[in-house]
Amino acid sequence: MDSDALHRLLRRIDGRGYKAYKQLQGIEYRVNSVRVKMVKVQGDPFAPPSIVRVEVPVGLAGSSARYPIPVADYLARIAYRSSKRYSMRGAGEGHSGEIRFPRPGPIILTRNSSRLVRVGDGYKLVLRFWVGLPSRKRRILGDVARRLLVESIPRLARDVVGHLRDPMVSEYIRVWREQEYIRSKLSERGLVSFVGDGSILPRACGGCEEPLRDAVPFESPPSLRVEFELPTGRTVSGMGVREGLTVIVGPAFHGKTTLLNAIGQGVWNHIPGDGRELVVTRRDAVWIQSENGRRVSCVDISPWIEYLPGLRDPKCWSTGNASGATSAMASLQEAVEAGSRVILIDEDWTATNFIHRDIWTEEVTGKKTLLTISELAASLKEAGVSLVIVASGSGILLSTADTVLVMDEYRPVDATDYARKRVAGSVLEGSRRYTMPKKRVIVKPIDLGKVKLRGFRIEGKSIGSVDLSACRQFEDERQLSTAVKLALRASRVRGGIVENVRGQIERFFDDPRSGVIDDPSLVEVRWLDIACVVNRLPFPPGSIRNVK
């Protein structure tokens, strides 16, 4: 359909009831080189807006053609800003006239709202976004709709494409390439993370994305400093966080948690100007914490159990009300089962009796039920699982630590040798060695029906409210919603939890049969984050079992 045919259609339905807009469902039209498709048409001006897909041929060459992910991410930010200029919000009631793109966060991701897709020898830019079809008193405003669909949207698309020549495109490519390169070299150099000299780790406020002004730039201890010669031609230095057990200690308010948070968010590539462009962590790093009252479904916590009252099987442990220590144990086991080999723990968020052993209390009680990180740290390392722990209140961990970092006014000091001398002979070993958790399978898939995501909670009639605040390694507001959508799909499939999750990621973005390929809100997530959501869903007893 050409733009004139669309104009005639809009004139026919002008002034009719809002549901007449449904005649636009699925139509495609062209305005010069811009192709527009009405993917989903809203049924009411106050309902969620319609979804539009726009395709524009673009000429890419050089770095832009070789690295489409950072280029498309940059264009998503341009589209978000430009949509406010081209939007006709206020042209009627409800969402009338609105053009809205998802707001990008401080990380470079594959985004459904902006993707560069290869077509033969060239590329096309595919934009997906929300549009509010205009009405007044639920009567169609045909002329306003024409200006919105035939003028504003094509102009927006051409404006976005025009920014392919911006100098900032090269900056996005550069920082993305550098971060990807460093991450690819971490394992071969025996590192789990790299924190570049000069990085700005503190944020402007608790919920802010912007770096803190006048913050102390990061400076690595000389003994831990490593260098990377980058493919962009420069050499950078910084602190290498080694495999094994790293313990971060120091007084309150000196930057321990700030450093650990930066390491955790280093699994994503950060945009220019973020301050953490040179904080790079292996993709399999997972933050765990205590979650009093969380649901656990058939998790193998046997390596951590000395004695379990009630003769319950620790190799398939389930509960609807886990304690602080057992919830952290279960989360660690779930993460390792899903493929993580780097665990991040902060004592402020984690039960004390999971981190260290108190032999004096054991003498008073006469019983011991749980083993601790301090007892299993050495065998975790032997199993290939590294830990980075903020633990100023657990000196016994220093005896088995490979690296001890003291944070002193946001400056790290390598205190490994000194700590070993001070705690020599204080090693505590558990009664057993750490063993990898058994894998689990879904034997009775569940369908939770319609649910809503409110903050970090999913709510629905069949599930009540499920807290997802422990799934915290998201830096884009759309990552959690994407993870929830994928987790709900994975929970409806019989088979291995990890395999289900990975399969959903592989199919979700590019399979037309998924029914959500044109959802503008979808962004890149890790299978580990989807597994985090799956593991908190309310599977009925017996729905999950481990592989024998």
Image (cartoon, grey):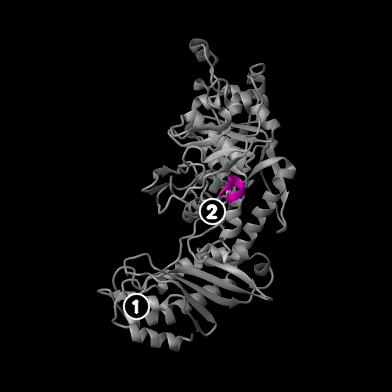
> Looking at the image, which residue is at 71% across and 54% down?
230
SS type, badge 2? loop
* Number of the label disc, if any, that sits on residue 274: 2
Q: Nearer the viewer, residue 361 or 239?
A: 361
> Looking at the image, which residue is at 53% across and 22% down?
311
Residue 496 counted in the magenta span:
yes
Look at the image and give the residue range highlighted in magenta: 494-501
Q: Is residue 3 above or below residue 283?
A: below
Q: Quadrant of residue 101?
A: bottom left
> Where does residue 391 sit, x and y in percent of width and height?
55, 29
Asked whether the beta carbons under mark 1 and mark 2 sit within 8 Å of each other, the answer is no
Residue topped by disc 1: 20
SS type, badge 1? helix
Q: Quadrant of residue 138?
A: bottom left
Please state which of the two labelled residues, at mark 1 or mark 2, is closer to the viewer.
Answer: 1
Mark 1, Cα crowd under 10 Å, few <14 / some 14-19 / many 20+, is some
> Looking at the image, which residue is at 64% across and 35% down?
548
Q: Main secondary structure of the magenta part?
A: helix
> Where does residue 390 sit, x and y in percent of width and height?
55, 32
Mark 2, Cα crowd under 10 Å, few <14 / some 14-19 / many 20+, is some
Amino acid type, mark 2: Asp
- Residue 255 in sight here: no
Q: Quick one: label 1 or label 2, which is nearer the N terminus? A: 1
Amino acid type, mark 1: Ala
Q: Nearer the viewer, residue 205 or 296?
A: 296
Q: Quadrant of residue 507?
A: bottom right
Q: Is residue 393 above or below residue 464?
A: above
Q: Nearer the viewer, residue 405 or 374?
A: 374
* Number of the label disc, if any, that sits on residue 334: none
Q: Nearer the viewer, residue 3 or 247?
A: 3
- Residue 456 in sight here: yes
